[in-house]
Amino acid sequence: MAKRLDQVLVIDVESTCWAGAPPDGQISEIIEIGLCTIDADRLERLEKRSFLVQPVKSEISSFCTELTTLTAEQFTGAGSFADAARVLKKSYHAKDRLWASWGDYDRRQFERMCLEFEVGNPFGPGHLNVKTLFAIATGSHHELGLEGACKKLGMDMTGTHHRGHDDAWNIAGVLCWLLSRIRDKSS
């Protein structure tokens, strides 16, 4: 199948985390997949969605709750990583669309989770590292965090930082700004 260039899927994951190393027998695993779709023609954010993923090989620490606001109770009835991957493939055609994230962490975390849980990667090879693109496009000699990038652009971050769907929405805003700038210069 040909690449679908109608939308860009912006992804931000939150994973189980601790103040230090994971406790014995636990691993860092994706617990939220935030998604924001971008209309590639109009460069507008279309949808913001959160997939909560039931942790299997770890517990949500108090450190994780402080960082993300996610509590263990919120995962009662949450789907599996395989469930979320299926929705991304079927409903969002993730294999055939460009997907983007802030840095490479999300891409690597998906690769690790797919191996760990023997789930096919829902994404194709077309990944865009918005963090690096932003640094190069703005002439910075180092990469900024999402908050720093938004501040540099004079954009207010919306929602709760370190919640997947809110961060995906904010990353998509930065990406739309970058792509608009590229289009303006090529006109």
Image (tube, rainbow, N blue to C red):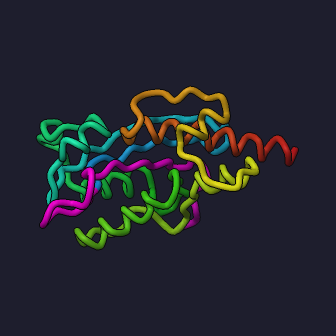
Q: Which residues are magenta?
A: 1-29
What residue is at 62 percent from the left and 44 percent from the top? 175
Report the number of numbered marks. Answer: 0
Vertical position of residue 103 compared to residue 119: above or below: above
Image check: 54 left or right of 14? Answer: left
What residue is at 31 percent from the left and 39 percent from the top? 68
In the rendered image, residue 12 lying in the magenta stretch gets the answer yes
Residue 17 in sight from this viewpoint: no
Image check: 144 left or right of 162? Answer: right
The percent coordinates of residue 37 (x first, y second) are 50, 42
Question: Which quadrant of the view contains residue 156?
Answer: top right
The percent coordinates of residue 162 (x first, y second) are 38, 40
What residue is at 24 percent from the left and 54 percent from the top? 83
Q: Nearer the viewer, residue 112 or 142?
A: 142
The percent coordinates of residue 74 (x first, y second) are 17, 36
Image check: 183 left or right of 176? Answer: right
Q: Nearer the viewer, residue 61 or 35?
A: 61
Considering every residue shown, the one lying at the far right of the view is 187
What residue is at 51 percent from the left and 61 percent from the top? 96
Considering every residue shown, the one lying at the far front of the view is 20
The quadrant of the rendering that contains the C terminus is top right
Residue 177 in sight from this viewpoint: yes
The percent coordinates of residue 129 (x first, y second) are 57, 57
In the rendered image, residue 9 lying in the magenta stretch gets the answer yes
